[in-house]
Each structure stands twice: as C-alpha cells, then as structure tokens.
Image: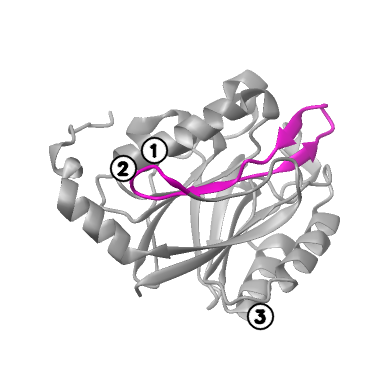
Amino acid sequence: MENLTIALIQSDLIWHNPEQNRINFTKKIHRINNYVDVIILPEMFTTGFSMNPQHISETMQGKTLKWMQRTASEKNAAIAGSIIIFENDNYYNRFLFVHPSGEIDYYDKRHLFTLAGEDKIYTAGVEKVINEYKGWKICPQVCYDLRFPVWARNVENYDVLLYVANWPKVRIKAWNALLQARAIENMCYTVGVNRVGIDENEFEYDGHSAVYNCLGEIITSVNESEEVTVISTLNKNHIHEIRNKLNFLNDKDSFKFL
C-alpha cells in the first residue's frame, strides 16, 4: 500500500476517569469524516499520566481494549494509544495497536520516567516491537523513550516511528527537537501525538503533535494548546527515494543489548 493516512488526536484528558475519556474520544473519532488507516491517541489516554494505577488500571480483557476493538471495526481503521495494564501482578504503560479485525499488537514502555517515579510503580518492557499493517512497518514508542536514540535505531528497516506522549510544556522544545532528530537519523516518518491541558498534579501540556518526513521536515503540525484532530498522509515512495538516494542507513553502527 503506497499511502498510509493517519489521524492524530491531540486532546485534553480527564484525570482518572476512563469511562468519560472513552466517551470523549468516541465523539472525536466519529467526527472524522475522511477515510483514515490509523487513529492515534495520546499516552495513558484513559487516565492521564498517573503514578496511582491501583484503581484505574485495566486488563487485556478490559473495557478500553474492547472499546478500541469495537471502534476500530466501526471506523475500519486501526486505533493506537497507551493505557495502564495490570498483568501478572505488574503494572505496565502499554502501547496498544488494535487492527480493524480486532487483532491486537502491543508494546510495553521501555524507558520509565524516573523523574516522576514511574520506575517505582510500573514494570519496564524488554522487547522492541515492529507492527506490520497494510504493508507498512510501524515502530511504537512511548513518551520518555524519545530521549533514547539507540532503542529507536532503525535496524529493522521500519517505515514509521510512532510516539504517544504526555510531554509537559516546560520541556516542549526537547520534544520538537528530538522528534525531528529521530526522523533524520532513522530516515523514516516520525509521528508524535501529545496531550494538552493541565493534569491533577498541575503539570501543563501544550501538544505540538507533529509528523516529520525522512529528511526531518515537518509536514503536519498542530497548534499548541488546542484540542484538535489532524489528518496526514504518508507516502512509501518518499521513503524509498530518500533512502536510495542517500543510503545513510547503510553506514549505521551496530549495537548489542546486554
């Protein structure tokens, strides 16, 4: 498939209220009149970025995953975003990629945000994941993962690097710079979907959701602080042309995770 059309939903989140967040995202999703292949929601889109998961976590048989499967089927589009999952006595910040068929791919956030104590509450993922969808290879990552380029290194020849986040306004310049850098160094489309609003801990978020092409050029961006859905179309020929012309990935270093 030559083109992949994605919808970035930049939204405020209601603190610790999965049901109301699902209702709000249902409205936003059903207002998408264009055909899209993937709909992307922020990190912890049902709760906000919480260090108190005991009463708001879900299982892989929970209401949010069933909602994602139902919505993906209704819209004939994949739904992606992270939520808090409780599994085997551990909490995970889990990125879910739900296909229209109901098939589920998932990735557990590797780099837990120690500044907020995420590493004390959640269990880190150990596996890098590549989702295959409509002939595209998509690498899912979550928020703080953005600061660690070795983990995102494009050794799998993936097409899209996809970040969902609750990235605060105070460090938004780093968000912008690092998204662009990941696109340049991996010669791939890089997508970042961030939230807006102020959470229960008084942290402010101002979006800056964006799509960068293989040269690090911004092709889609969202006005800061606004709740908005933006559509962007990615083109496979752009990836092939840039990689064939420049061949930078052929000169990459090899890394081994111990």
The answer to whether the residue labelled 2 contacts the one labelled 1, judged by CB atoms less than 8 Å apart, is yes
Q: Using a 10 Å C-alpha cutoff, classify the residue at mark 3 as few (fewer than 14 neighbours), some (14 to 19) or many (20 or more).
A: few
Where residue 30 sits, quadrant-wise, is bottom right
What secondary structure is found at the residue carrying circle 3?
A: helix
The residue stretch that appears in magenta? 191-218
* N-terminal-most mark, 3 or 2: 3
Q: Name the residue rendered at 44%, 68% in the picture.
A: 4
The amino acid pointed to by label 3 is Glu
What secondary structure is found at the residue carrying circle 1?
A: helix
Q: Residue at label 1?
A: 182
Which-is-in-front pick, marks 3 and 1?
A: 1
Q: Nearer the viewer, residue 108 or 231?
A: 231
Q: Name the residue rendered at 30%, 46% in the picture.
A: 187
**Residue 175 percent coordinates (x, y):** 54, 32
Give the Cα separation between the discs numbered 3 and 2: 34 Å
Q: Residue at label 2?
A: 186
Q: Name the residue rendered at 75%, 61% in the picture.
A: 25
Name the side, left or right, on which 222 lies relative to 148: right
Name the side, left or right, on which 90 lies relative to 181: right
Q: Nearer the viewer, residue 107 or 76?
A: 76
**Residue 26 percent coordinates (x, y):** 76, 67
Q: Residue at label 3?
A: 74
Q: Using a 10 Å C-alpha cutoff, classify the residue at mark 2 as few (fewer than 14 neighbours), some (14 to 19) or many (20 or more).
A: many
Residue 192 is one of the magenta-drawn residues? yes
Name the side, left or right, on which 214 lies relative to 102: left
The answer to whether the residue labelled 3 contacts the one labelled 1, judged by CB atoms less than 8 Å apart, is no
The amino acid pointed to by label 2 is Asn
